[in-house]
Image: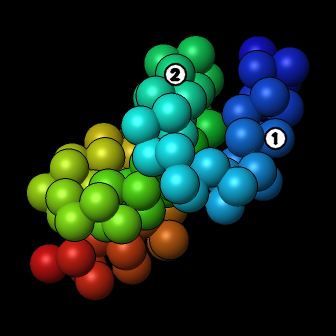
Amino acid sequence: MAETQLRCSALHRSSPALASEYSEAQQKFVTCIQVAPKFDQAYLNLARLYVLLKEPEKAGEILRELLRQQPENKLAQQTLEMLN
């Protein structure tokens, strides 16, 4: 699990480099969520990607899923409030 989170963390740090490859970035974040469902940065970055793609409904769904698992996640709460 720790190794997976390290790989997902590396993706998080490199995500600006993937900005022009939205589809690839989306798939990688989804994979991170499937493999490491407690890694909040994957959810947050996927939500950011959906905002960039002008898909706020999908961003909201991802943030609500994160908040079901981590109701105390302030960044997810604040981001969801900004979307609403």
The structure's colour scheme is rainbow
Query: Can residue 40 be seen at all in this image of the molecule?
Result: no
Farthest residue toward the bottom?
82
Residue 44 is tagged as none
Question: Which secondary structure, mark 1?
Answer: helix
Residue 31: numbered disc: 2
Q: Please provide percent x and percent y for residue 73.
A: 50, 62
Q: Could you tell me residue 18's position as x and y percent? A: 62, 49
Looking at this view, name the residue that lies furthest to the front.
Answer: 20
Residue found 45% across the figure and 46% down from its top? 22
Residue ID at (53%, 54%): 20
Callout 1 amino acid: Ala
Element on which disc 2 rests: helix
Residue 35's spot in the image, x, y percent?
58, 16
Which x, y percent locates residue 84? Answer: 14, 78
Q: Residue at x 37, y 74 (%)?
A: 79
The kind of residue tagged 2 is Thr
Q: Residue 50 is drawn in which quadrant?
A: bottom left
Q: Residues within 10 Å of mark 1 (few under 14, many from 20)?
A: few
Identify the disc placed on residue 10.
1
Q: Earlier in the sequence, mark 1 or mark 2?
A: 1
Residue 8 in view here: yes
- For the image, the number of numbered tags is 2
Give me the residue at 31% from left, 66% from top.
51
Name the image quarter holding the N terminus: top right
